[in-house]
Image (tube, rainbow, N blue to C red):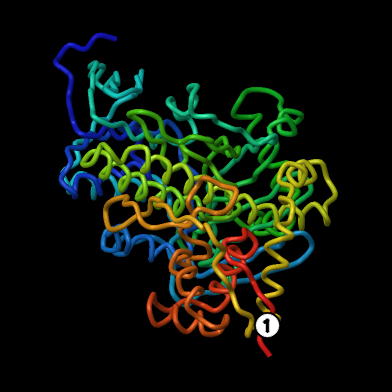
Amino acid sequence: MPGTRPPDTPDVLVIGGGPAGSTAARLLASWGWTVRLAHRPASRPALAESLPPSTRKVLALLGQTDTIGAAPFFPNHGNVAWWGGSIRETRSDEAGFHVARAGFDALLRQAARAAGVSIADAIVRRVEAGEAPSCDLLTCEGQPLRVAPRLVLDCSGHASLVARRGGFGRVDAPYRTLALAAEWESEAWPDAERTRTVVESFADGWAWSVPLSSTKRHITVMLDPDFARTLNAGARDTALQRIYAHALADAPRIHARAARARQITRPWGANASVYHSASPCAPGVLLAGDAASFIEPLSSAGVKKAMLSAWRAAVVANTILGHPAMIPHAFAFYAAREREVYEECRQAAAGFFREAAAYHRSPFWEARVAAEADPAPDVALRQAHERLRAAPRARLRVPAGLRFGSAPEVEGREIVLREAIVIPGSDTPVRFAAGVNLPALVRLAGKCDDVGSIFSAYHAHVGPAPVDSLVTGLSVLVARQALILEDARP
């Protein structure tokens, strides 16, 4: 689409003004880069979010504590979960946040604008990746706009235009999830749940009740779209209400609370299906937040994950814009870390799936258990861990020919290369396991008489680390033959 003006040439074009896009844009602008943010106004309400107290640490890392902490969001003091026939309750003295996404996202965009980000209310029509990327936008006033940035960050979420293109290896889960939500109002929500999220599993899905004030809640049901279609009848609005009411009735505890409340909006739908991009970076383009991967909403970690993904993307962008020679290392770091985070979230969700499937024994849950089967156990790692636990006086020897290399990691605002271990049988250097510096652990093991003295030396020369983490680090090295565990000394 030809532009009517010369193209804008910012350092970075960020697509999407949600938590990921606004976070990445603000960071890069505050670090001195010119940033254009293309934000498409939402055409439908977003789902409410339950942000746990640990979100405050993320906000502090990103410099957003004042932006969000001072906002009048409803506090989050934990949750109540009726899950798979059991009940779990968590309480927190330090409050997290229950937020309506429209207000939350708007505050983040305001912070980005204050940092110097130029925001355009526009639809992205085309993105051309490569060493010299270009993008065609259409503003809300109908004005075509061509942007020729040095780098594109796609933070546009589930419907990402870029992520759906070839080359990013998008992998969809074999099951799908439809979220249907509506807003409810009541003066009679139980006092014990007034500032807590409520979750309930049922045979064909699960329900999620998030308070936005002392009287208002979003109640969302998560279903298989195929099951929802079996209830479809009549006009669209009528069908959504029918499906929503039917599913909510299957969650007896949340339904009983809704029976004392008034539904004040019609239901709306959102795609909540899980996916990830096997390669979230390509020449000229990074995928961040939900554009890179979408995790199970069960975790309540989606916003935190998106903002941390944006932070990593900003660090990578800052690195490759300032030091182009670091592009392959920065991309390798980013792709590996995005995969690790997605896998951690996937395994956490799998535990909830198994519990629900064991109780409900329904196709909805069994399909999720089948898709998220646990990986085969690492027998060598387990055996090494057991041997180290049983023999704290054992000696560890560095094998002849062990090689050291370099691996990328975050240092401040940049990706840098630091010393790493080349695991025997692999060409990929590894620097950390369980947060423990593996090269330092190997060098100390070569100088110490036993496992206990290695731990003491690590604390003295590297820094404090939990014993369990140090045992895990040594176990990885022993299991991968980067250290040899000899018989215990008498």
Q: Nearer the viewer, residue 436 or 287?
A: 436
Instruction: Quadrant for residue 439, please give it.
Output: bottom left
Q: Nearer the viewer, residue 455 or 375?
A: 455
Residue at (67%, 70%) from the top-left corner? 385
Of residues 211 and 88, the one nearer the viewer is: 88
Residue 13: x %, y % from top left: 27, 32
Above or below — where is 171 with respect to 235? Answer: below
Above or below, comparing residue 378 to residue 226 in the picture: below
Disc 1 target residue:
488
- Judged left or right of residue 117, residue 98 is right
At label 1, counting other C-alpha atoms closer than 10 Å, the crowd grade (few under 14, some 14-19, many 20 or more) is some
* In the image, residue 216 above or below residue 143: below
The image shows residue 444 at horizontal and vertical percentages of 46, 74
| Residue 170, x across and y down, in percent | 55, 31
Kindly identify the amino acid type of the residue bearing the numbered disc 1: Ala
Rendered residue at 23%/45% (across/down): 28
